[in-house]
Amino acid sequence: MRLSDAHCHFFSAGFFGALARQRGGGADAASLCRELQWDAPGTPEALADRWARELDAHGVARSALIASVPGDEASVAAAVARHPWRFIGCFMLDPSAPDAPERARRALTDLGLRVMCLFPAMHHVPLHDDRTLRVVETAAAVPGAAVFVHCGVLSVGVRARLGLPSRFDLRLGDPLGVARLALAFSQVPFIIPHFGAGLFREALMAADACANVYLDTSSSNGWIRYTPGLTLDAVFERALAVAGPARLLFGTDSSFFPRGWQRAIHEDQRAIVERLRVGEADAAGLFGGNLDRLFPHQTS
């Protein structure tokens, strides 16, 4: 069965440099990596090569790579240019930036990226805000582009480890707001990661109301502890029943080295799918085929 990962983070030198600037006090990317005991990423091309080798080692055919701070689009674009058949380029965008629409347009056209990632709780921009609408309109004008919207609980482990504040407004990441956008832009695929990250019911409602809403399965999904008695098996069962197997995208939320690709997440989720007796064709879609259908290989 072909395996692809819809959710990996590209922790480039630009990513660590942005964190170093936020920390101040003479910190730089190299010092942060030493403190975290993580491998320094090197150039975007070197990091892309390492990810390609890592995916080979685990039998993963393709992966989405997310530039995980605003302004780091060029790093992922370099990775995609180096391995165009391997990586699907995604980038984080802050809609409150004055140049956000132009930055989105350039990323999705000139740089060849394919997914715009919005984090409303992080950037304090509601999904119904005109600034959000403008950048979604920009994405909608590019054939084949998709919009990823982080909803529910948001925790960035690297920020906590470095003592950086995370002043997130969790009220803003509501999947029902995604549904409003998905209805307005019915030709655009909208991806809600982590099954809604605690807003599972609302994510199901959004997927039920909008055929262009997809759910990704990534991370350990620790948010299930907010609902007593809920299991990940039950989450998969409900998502399969409501959204259907064609709109579920397997992901791990892998990010840094030396940890690399999180094989245990794949094993756990594969076991769940087997316990639920999901058919072979539907399982093949969930673990790779749906991602390939959503983001076919570009010919140029």
Image: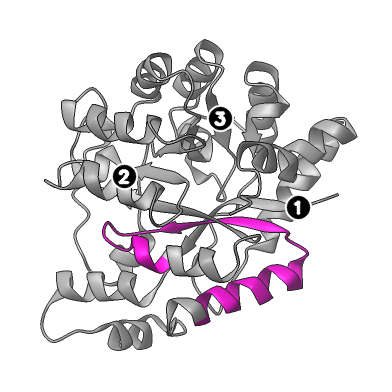
Residue 25, image quadrant: bottom left
Q: Label 3 is placed on what type of residue? A: Tyr
**Residue identified by numbered label 1:** 3
State the separation of the CA atoms marked 1 and 2: 30 Å
- Residue at coordinates 60% horizontally, 41% vertically from top-left? 217
Distance between mark 3 and mark 1 Cα atoms? 18 Å
Q: Earlier in the sequence, mark 3 or mark 2?
A: 2
Of the image marks 3 and 1, the number of the one nearer the N terminus: 1
Residue 12 visible from this viewpoint: yes
Q: Which residue is mark 2?
A: 105
State the mark number for residue 159: none
Q: Is residue 60 magenta?
A: yes
Marker disc for residue 214: 3
Q: Specify which label sits upstream in the sequence, 1 or 2.
A: 1
The residue type indicated by label 2 comes to Arg
Q: Which element type, helix, strand or loop, lies under badge 1?
A: loop
Magenta stretch? Answer: 46-75
Foreground residue among 63 and 112: 112
Residue nearer the viewer, 167 or 90: 90
**Neighbours of disc 1 within 10 Å: few (<14), some (14-19), many (20+):** many
x 67%, y 57%: residue:
62
Res. 168 visible in picture:
no
Of the pair 197 and 130, the residue shown nearer to us = 130
Instruction: Tell whether label 2 touches label 1 (CB within 8 Å).
Output: no
**Residue 113 image offset from top left, x and y in percent:** 45, 52
